[in-house]
């Protein structure tokens, strides 16, 4: 790997032993992927994936403390993934006991470390840091050091930034030293599509279901999607961006997609068109039958497959302000049609603290509250990690939550019926 004189000096200890170790870590990371060089991070902010104070993660806290004790700070302020618990989210005495006494016992301590290291502010906890309300939206072409998969794929695809699917801790290492290895999705060649996905559905495909189908087919490759602009249009407006947020999260969790191109819509596809398609690219056709087949083949891992749902989570990744408003209208209409006044299943909508702050300033907030829906800033994944929670029959329209937990997937329309009328 080629290193500049400055990078060599850091590696040789000119800025201290700790910084030398950080640089060595990034060099070894790059060598593992045959990177030819390190390139500067150019974004204003970073985003970290490790947000939770699990007791068993003591090596992370020890590492963070070593950095702080050495006076090493992040070169960028950063946001971080969501907090793991919220007293407003339904949990019984034993579940809360496990959360607070056995699982997230280091949360306050770890958040103090994050603040000292460079957290943007006390409310910068969300997997959707690119929301306008949060303020961590990179620009086209900027080099990032992120690790959160749903944020990486959004930044690469919708915003046109450049970031590999880094692992946790490597994200902060890159930010501290100011460089990341140049390979994969940072390169022009690595951003070319090796799959052409043709959408031939008779209606707008469910974002989370379409993303799941593509992710499971292409895995870590880059897909070029043709025909989706028929349903989304050619303008990256709020509706399209919200769709792509959920679509991308499913491609990244049901597969390992870090970048996708949507013909006539996403920045590089608009700019470069079919020249983004690599020679010999494979083809995948998605029609109604294919999506139905994908959905029907999801495993049901509830102990009792016929159990009545006890909880519904929406917002993995976190919901946008417009989604909160739209779902308020949907829930009200669903309740009116069913003759119920409140949701019949405990339901939690999760969003970034700053998005919830903005939502609470609108008239929608009191309306949603009146339906019985709870809003929260937590990560549903972290809630479901509790062994007493993972045995619950939980439903969701998030394919990410379905993939990583025991939660069961239903489409948005099916979820609406379940929470306002009943049934599954």
Image (cartoon, rainbow, N blue to C red):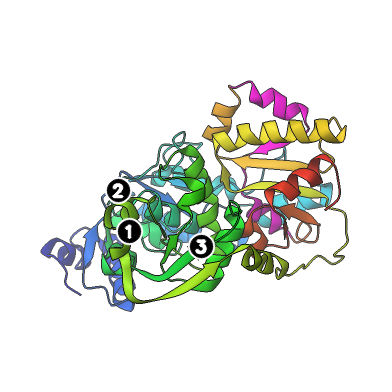
385 left or right of 58?
right
Mark 2 falls on what kind of element? loop
Residue 282, placed above or below residue 385:
below
Alpha carbon of mark 1 to alpha carbon of mark 3: how far?
22 Å
| 369 drawn magenta | yes
Q: Position of residue 181 (x, y in %)?
A: 28, 66
- Tag 2 or tag 3, which sits nearer the N-term? 2
Q: Position of residue 269 (x, y in %)?
A: 34, 56
- Whether residue 112 is visible to the viewer of this picture, yes or no, is no
Mark 3 falls on what kind of element? helix
Check residue 174 in the rendering and tell me which mark sits there, or answer none: 1
Alpha carbon of mark 1 to alpha carbon of mark 2: how far?
19 Å
Of residues 351 and 236, which is closer to you in this image? Answer: 236
- Whether residue 278 is visible to the viewer of this picture, yes or no, is yes
Of residues 324 and 60, which is closer to you in this image? Answer: 324
Corner quadrant of residue 398: bottom right
| 117 drawn magenta | no
Task: Identify the magenta region.
Answer: 362-386
Mark 1 falls on what kind of element? helix
Q: What residue sits right under mark 2 in the picture?
A: 140
Residue 13, placed above or below residue 155:
below
At label 3, counting other C-alpha atoms closer than 10 Å, the crowd grade (few under 14, some 14-19, many 20 or more) is: many
């Amino acid at each position: 790997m080629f290193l500049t004189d400055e990078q060599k000096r850091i590696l040789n200890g000119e800025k201290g032993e700790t910084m030398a170790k950080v640089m060595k870590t990034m060099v070894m990371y790059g060598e593992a992927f045959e990177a030819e060089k390190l390139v500067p991070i150019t974004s204003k902010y970073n985003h970290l994936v490790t947000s939770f104070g699990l007791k068993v993660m003591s090596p992370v806290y020890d590492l963070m403390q070593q950095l702080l004790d050495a006076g090493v700070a992040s070169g960028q302020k950063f946001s971080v993934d969501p907090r793991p618990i919220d007293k407003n989210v339904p949990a019984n005495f034993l579940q809360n006991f496990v959360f607070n006494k056995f699982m997230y016992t280091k949360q306050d301590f770890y958040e103090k470390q994050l603040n000292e290291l460079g957290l943007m502010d006390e409310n910068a906890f969300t997997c959707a840091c690119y929301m306008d309300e949060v303020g961590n939206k990179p620009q086209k072409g900027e080099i990032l050091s992120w690790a959160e998969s749903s944020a990486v794929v959004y930044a690469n695809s919708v915003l046109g930034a450049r970031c590999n699917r880094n692992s946790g801790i490597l994200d902060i290492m890159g930010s501290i030293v100011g460089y990341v290895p140049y390979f994969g999705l940072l390169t022009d060649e690595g951003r070319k599509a090796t799959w052409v996905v043709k959408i031939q559905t008779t209606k707008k495909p469910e974002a989370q279901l379409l993303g799941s189908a593509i992710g499971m087919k292409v895995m870590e490759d880059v897909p070029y999607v043709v025909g989706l602009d028929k349903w989304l249009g050619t303008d990256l407006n709020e509706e399209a961006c919200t769709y792509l947020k959920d679509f991308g999260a499913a491609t990244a969790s049901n597969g390992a997609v870090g970048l996708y191109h949507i013909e006539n819509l996403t920045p590089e596809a608009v700019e470069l068109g079919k020249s983004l398609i690599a020679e010999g690219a494979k083809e995948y056709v998605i029609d109604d039958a294919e999506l139905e087949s994908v959905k029907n083949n999801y495993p049901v891992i509830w102990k009792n497959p016929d159990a009545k749902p006890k909880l519904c989570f929406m917002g993995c990744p976190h919901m946008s302000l417009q989604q909160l408003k739209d779902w308020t209208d949907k829930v009200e209409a669903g309740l009116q049609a069913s003759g119920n006044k409140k949701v019949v299943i405990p339901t939690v909508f999760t969003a970034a603290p700053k998005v919830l702050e903005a939502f609470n300033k609108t008239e929608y907030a009191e309306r949603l509250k009146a339906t019985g829906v709870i809003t929260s800033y937590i990560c549903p994944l972290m809630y479901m990690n509790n062994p007493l929670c993972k045995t619950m029959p939980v439903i969701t329209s998030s394919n990410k939550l379905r993939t990583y937990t025991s939660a069961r997937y239903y489409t948005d329309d099916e979820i609406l019926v379940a929470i306002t009328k009943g049934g599954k």
